[in-house]
């Protein structure tokens, strides 16, 4: 598969305990018409399987990765170390500081291997950022991303509690 068909998102979680976040990301991507695939691969329990999955990105058409992890949260960085496909890390709540540990582990990647990081547990934003990255080369997807943003704004405007006082 050629690079210009890298239109899918690879979602990986380090544990089945994080699968709900992966499902949230996949649902947002599906809403935008973006295909995704989800894997449960621990970077420390199954490093060779993780490497094999990353090595298959070109043939699978994966153009962005969402890597979701808690605790030491090395999964996004390990994936990023093996590919130049953009990696978005989602730190998960829990641990000694309810996600602050995972947030710092993901956002504090040493220089040379970037990982984009969203807020703790914010799989929705990871999906939206993945879609925005893919939309750079996909005008139809760009239109859908813009439409979703507009609908979000309209929902705020339509909220009756936000009605301004009439003169
Ligand atoms: C990481 O440690 C996973 O990403 C998960 O967030 C956390 C807990 O994993 P389990 O104890 O559920 O295997 O591997």
Image (cartoon, rainbow, N blue to C red):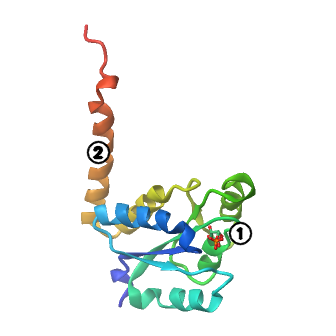
Query: In what quadrant of the picture does the C terminus appear?
Result: top left
* Distance from mark 2 CB to nearest ligand 1 atom below 8 Å: no
Whether 149 is drawn above or below 92: the answer is above
Number of numbered markers: 2
Please report whichever mark, 1 or 2, sits nearer to the chain's N-terminal start: 1
**Relative to 112, is 165 on the left or the right?**
left
Image quadrant for the N terminus? bottom left
Answer yes or no: is residue 113 visible: no
Q: Residue furthest front?
A: 17
**Residue 111: quarter of image:** bottom right
Marks 1 and 2, Cα distance to the nearest angstrom? 36 Å
Using residue 156 as the reference point, say whether residue 42 is left or right of it: right
Task: Give the image quadrant in which the ligand numbered 1 is located.
Answer: bottom right
Residue 42 seen in render:
yes
Of 162 and 143, the residue lying toward us: 162
Q: Classify 133 as above or below 54.
A: above
Q: Which residue is mark 1?
A: 111
Tag nearer the camera, 1 or 2: 2
- The part of the image, by quadrant, that contains residue 5 is bottom left
Question: In the image, is residue 17 above or below residue 42?
Answer: above
The residue that disc 2 covers is 150
């Amino acid at each position: 598969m050629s690079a210009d068909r890298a239109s899918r998102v690879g979602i990986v979680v380090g544990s089945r305990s994080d699968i709900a976040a992966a499902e949230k990301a996949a649902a947002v991507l599906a809403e935008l018409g973006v295909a995704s695939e989800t894997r449960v691969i621990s970077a420390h329990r199954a490093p060779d399987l993780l490497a094999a999955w990353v090595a298959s990105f070109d043939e699978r058409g994966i153009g962005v990765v969402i890597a979701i992890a808690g605790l030491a949260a090395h999964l996004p960085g390990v994936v990023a170390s093996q590919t130049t496909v953009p990696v978005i890390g989602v730190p998960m709540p829990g641990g000694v500081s309810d996600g602050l540990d995972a947030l710092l582990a993901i956002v504090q990647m040493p220089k040379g291997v970037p990982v984009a990081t969203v807020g703790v547990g914010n799989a929705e934003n990871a999906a939206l950022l993945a879609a925005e990255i893919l939309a750079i080369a996909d005008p139809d997807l760009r239109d859908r991303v813009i439409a979703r943003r507009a609908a979000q704004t309209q929902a705020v405007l339509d909220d009756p509690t936000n009605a301004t006082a009439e003169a």
